[in-house]
Image (spheres, helix red, strand yellow):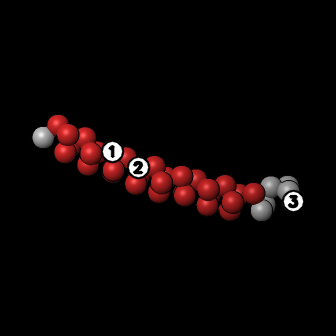
Amino acid sequence: MEGRKPVIPLTNLAHSTVLVELSKTLEQVYKNASKNNF
């Protein structure tokens, strides 16, 4: 159990970072697609 405690915040931080990057990427892709289609 002791080994798991420090891992949890790191996992949450990494998960949040991935979500933020994914959101930015999706937003860019959506904007580019909108420009190309319309």
In space, the residues marked 1 and 3 are separated at their CA atoms by: 42 Å
In space, the residues marked 2 and 1 are separated at their CA atoms by: 6 Å
- Kind of residue sitting beneath label 3: Glu
* Residue that badge 3 annotates: 2
- Kind of residue sitting beneath label 2: Thr
In the image, residue 1 lies at what x, y percent? Answer: 85, 55
* Residue that badge 2 annotates: 25
Question: Mark 2 or mark 3, which has the lower sequence index?
Answer: 3
**Left or right: where does residue 2 sit relative to residue 32?**
right
Count the numbered circles shown: 3
Question: Mark 1 or mark 3, which has the lower sequence index?
Answer: 3
**Which residue is drawn at the image coordinates 68% and 62% (left, top)?**
9
In the image, residue 16 lies at what x, y percent? Answer: 54, 57
Residue 4 picture quarter: bottom right
* Residue that badge 1 annotates: 29
Secondary element at tag 3: loop
Residue 30 picture quarter: top left
